[in-house]
Amino acid sequence: MKWLLKYSLILVASCLSGALKAQQLAQYSQYLDNYFLVNSAATNIQNNLQLDFGFRHYWTDFQGSPKTVYLSAYAPLSRPDASQHMQSAMRLTDNLDTARLNTSLAPKSNHVAGMIITQDDIGLFRKTTNHFTYSFHMQLTEQLRISVSPKVGWVHLSLNDDLRVLDPNDQPFQQFLDNYQRQGMLDLGFGMWLYSDKFFLGYSLEQLTQNRGFRSQELDGFEFQAHHFLMAGHRFSVSPRISLIPHMLIRYVNDHASSIDMSLRAEYGQRFWAGLSYRRQNALVVMFGVVVSDQLSFGYSFDHSTNINTLNRINAHEFSLSMNLFPNLHK
C-alpha cells in the first residue's frame, strides 16, 4: 500500500501547487475581531501589549486535514493620549477629547510596532511566515486619522516529516521530496487605514516581492502572487448599548478572480458580539465573541461551505483568544 499512498501524495502536491498560486495566504474569519490579520496598519491604540492567538481547522473529519495557527502582537512605542485611544480599528468615542484636538496645533502622532507569526499545514506541505510591522498613526482632521504600515518578513516552505512514505532506493520520489524540502524567501507588504470613531477604510498589499530575487533555490510550483485587500466598515448606534457594524472585504489576486466577504457584526455593551458573514461562492460564516474582562476575550466562528461541488466543500472551525497585557505599559 505504500506505493498507493506515495503517488496519492504526489497527486495532492500537484493540486496544491496550483492552489498555492490562487490562494496562497491563510483564510481567516476572525479578522472581524482582529483587523490586524489582514491589514498591518489596523492596530488598536491602547497603553498595553495586544496579544492575539488563533487556530483554524478545515475538514475536521479527515486525518491530516489543513490547519492554521497564528499569533499576532503589537504595542505602542510611547504613551498615547486618551483622545487617541482606538479599539477594533475605530477610535473610542467615549475617550475623544475634541477640545484638545481643536486647540492643538500639532496633534500627537502614534507609533506602533508589531509582529505576526503563522503556520499553515496543508497535507504534505507546511508554510511558516514571520512578519514584523510598524504603523504610523497621524491626525488629519478633528475626527479623521490615517495609519500607514510597512511589513517585512520571511516565508519558509517545508514538507511535513510525518507524512513521508518512502520505499527503499526510491530515487524518483526522493528527488521529488528534495525539490520541495526547504525553501525560504523575503516577503514584503504594506497597509493603509483611514478611520474615525464611526467608520474605517483600509487597503493592504501582501507578497509584494512575489519571491523574485530572494529565494534560496528555484521554487517551481511556488510562484507567489501579489494579493490586494480592500476593507470598509461603519458603526451604527442602535441604542446606547447596541451597535451594528456592516463590513465588506474584497480580495484580489493578480490574474485571478476577486472574492468578496459581506458581514454584519452586532455588539452589546462592549461585552458580547455576534456576526454573520457571506463569502461569495464559498461559505456562510457564523461567529460570536465574549469579552471576559478588560484583559481577556475569546471568539469562535464556523464556516459552512456553500460550494455546490462536494469535492470543494470546506467547513472550518476557528478559535481566537485576545489578551491585553502590561496595562500602563508607558508611564
Image: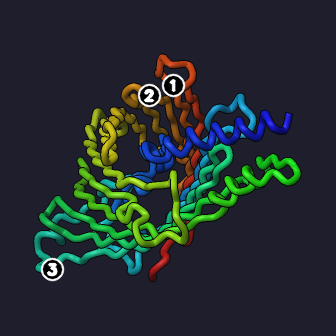
Q: At which x and y percent is residue 319?
A: 60, 43
- Residue 184 occupies quadrant: bottom right
Of the image marks 1 and 2, the number of the one nearer the N terminus = 2
Quadrant assignment for the N terminus:
top right
Of the image marks 2 and 3, the number of the one nearer the N terminus = 3
Q: CA distance from mark 1 to mark 3?
A: 50 Å
What residue is pinned by disc 2?
Answer: 282
Point 28% across, 67% down: residue: 148
Q: Secondary structure at mark 2?
A: loop
Tell me whether the residue at label 1 lies in contact with that at label 2, contact meaning CB atoms closer than 8 angstroms: yes
Q: Badge 3: how crowded within 10 Å, few (<14), some, or many (20+)?
A: few
Q: Amino acid at mark 3?
A: Ala
Side (left or right) of 217 relative to 274: right
Of the image marks 1 and 3, the number of the one nearer the N terminus = 3
Point 24% across, 56% down: residue: 195
Point 17% across, 60% down: residue: 144
What residue is pinned by disc 1?
Answer: 305
Q: At which x and y percent is residue 116?
A: 51, 63
Q: CA distance from mark 2 to mark 3?
A: 47 Å
Quadrant assignment for the C terminus:
bottom left
Q: For the residues carrying marks 1 and 3, which lies nearer the camera in this image?
A: 1
Residue 295 visible in this rendered orientation of the protein = no
Extreme right residue here? 168
What residue is pinned by disc 3?
Answer: 106
Q: At which x and y percent is residue 136?
A: 30, 72
User: Which one is in front, 252 or 234?
Assistant: 252
On screen, residue 178 above or below 269: below
Q: Which mark is residue 110?
A: none
Q: Secondary structure at mark 1?
A: strand
